[in-house]
Image (tube, rainbow, N blue to C red):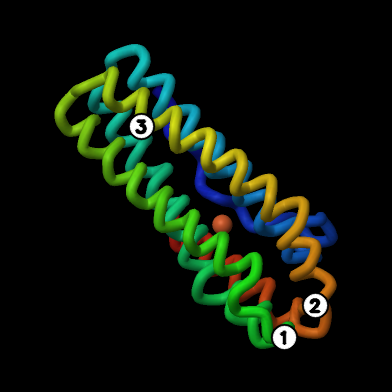
Amino acid sequence: MSATPSFVPAAPGSAAATSLSGLFTSHHRHCDEAFAVAEKAAAAGDWPAAEAAFDTFSTDLLAHFATEEEQLFPAFESATGMTGGPTAVMRHEHVQMRGLVANARQALADHDGDAFLGEADTLLILMEQHNLKEENILYPMCDAQLAGQAAELLPRCTASLQSGA
Ligand SMILES: [Fe+2]
């Protein structure tokens, strides 16, 4: 089972290097890949590989949530004055997903494949819906509202995302 590669800083000039939406969307794909590795190992009953891969995935996902909650969302909220809008919904969904991650991790520790795949399925559905809302609605709003701060936010957010795996 190959390890998921680390999140690589974007090439200069690429979408991930030049826009907040590009950066956060590319990190979503990075998390998706890490998740798929864990799910595949669990489906094969390879518990050590599944636990290692799920650890990598959850470290990445939690770094993603933290970067949004501590860097991106506060910047958006102070630029727009909107604290009860889309970022509040996203923060609430992060809480739900953290719970599912904890449940899935426990199921892996118990070597309970059915429980893991059940939790992982629910997590995957929630993650897909959440990511679509961010990529289609919130991130483009961030690009528009935070254009003047992007040069400063991009390296800060990249470093924070990389504090995952
Ligand atoms: Fe999010």
Between residue 98 and residue 57, name the one nearer to us: 98
Whole-percent x, y for residue 143 in the image: 80, 69
Between residue 73 and residue 158, name the one nearer to us: 73
The residue located at (54%, 42%) in the rendering is 127
Q: Amino acid at mark 3?
A: Glu
Mark 3 or mark 1: which comes first in sequence?
Answer: 1
Quarter of the rendering containing residue 104: top left
Quarter of the rendering containing residue 1: top left
Q: Amino acid at mark 1?
A: Ala
Q: Which residue is mark 2?
A: 145
How many marks overall? 3
Asked which secondary structure carries label 2, the reply is helix
Whole-number angstrom distance, CA of label 3 to CA of label 2: 36 Å
Residue 90 left/right relative to 85 = left
Asked which secondary structure carries label 1, the reply is helix
Q: Is residue 112 visible?
A: yes
Tell me whether circle 2 and circle 1 mark residues in contact (CB < 8 Å): yes
Q: Which residue is mark 1?
A: 79
Whole-number angstrom distance, CA of label 2 to CA of label 1: 7 Å
Q: Which mark is residue 119?
A: 3
40 vs 134: above or below: above
Q: Residue furthest left?
A: 110
Quarter of the rendering containing residue 71: bottom right
The residue located at (46%, 56%) in the rendering is 94
Q: Quadrant of ligand 1?
A: bottom right
The residue located at (30%, 27%) in the rendering is 116
Q: Amino acid at mark 2?
A: Gln
78 vs 132: above or below: below
The reply to whether the residue tagged 2 has its Cβ within 8 angstroms of ligand 1 is: no
